[in-house]
Amino acid sequence: MGSRANYVIAGDDGFELFYSRGGAVTMLADLARGPAGIEQIRGLDPAEHWLDDVWCEGAALVDTANEVLLHFTWHHDGVADRARRLAEIRHAWSGWDVRWAYGGIEDAVAYLGIDRLSVRTERGRPGRRTCRTGPARRTARAW
C-alpha cells in the first residue's frame, strides 16, 4: 500500500512532473523545510502521467517563476492540524504564495492550464451516479 503523490516543479519553461509512492504521508513535514526541498523533489522519480483523483493522495506544485506553492494531502489529523502545519509551511516559504489545493490534484493541473477532467475519474464526474448510499426513499401517499 502506498500514499501516492505527484510533485511538480513549474517555471518559465514549462513544468517537470514527479512521482512518489509514499510522499503523501510525509508531504507536510517535507514542505515545512522550505524552498530547500525543491532539490529533494528533483530527486524523485520522473512521472510519465498524472495520478487521478482516486489514486492521488497528495500533490505539491512549486512554481519557481511566480513563487507559488500549491499543495494538498489526505494525510493530516483534521482541520486544526492542517491549519497549524500550513502556518509552519507558510513561515518556511516566507515571501511565497502558499495555497492549500482544496480541489486536490484537479487544482494542480488547472493551475498549469490543463483540463481538470484529465485527472478526474468517471466516479467524480458531475451528473454520473455509480453507487447508491442506501435504499431508495419511499414516500407515503395520501389517498
Image: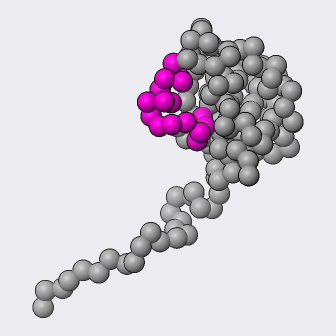
- Asked whether residue 117 is in view, the answer is no
4 w.r.t. 139: above or below: above
Instruction: Determine which quarter of the picture holds residue 133.
Output: bottom left
List the single residue furthest toward the top: 95
Q: Position of residue 28 (x, y in %)?
A: 62, 28
Q: What colour scheme does the image use?
A: one colour
Residue sitting at 55 percent across and 36 percent down? 76
Residue sitting at 53 percent across and 23 percent down? 86
Relative depth, front residue between 41 and 66: 41
Q: Position of residue 109 (x, y in %)?
A: 67, 38
Instruction: Determine which quarter of the picture holds residue 43.
Output: top right
Exactly how many numbered labels are in the figure?
A: 0
23 w.r.t. 62: above or below: below
Residue sitting at 51 percent across and 18 percent down? 87
Part of the protein shown in magenta: 72-87
Asked if the magenta segment contains residue 86, the reply would be: yes
Q: Position of residue 107 (x, y in %)?
A: 60, 37
From the viewer's perspective, is 116 left or right of 10?
left
From the viewer's perspective, is 58 left or right of 8?
left
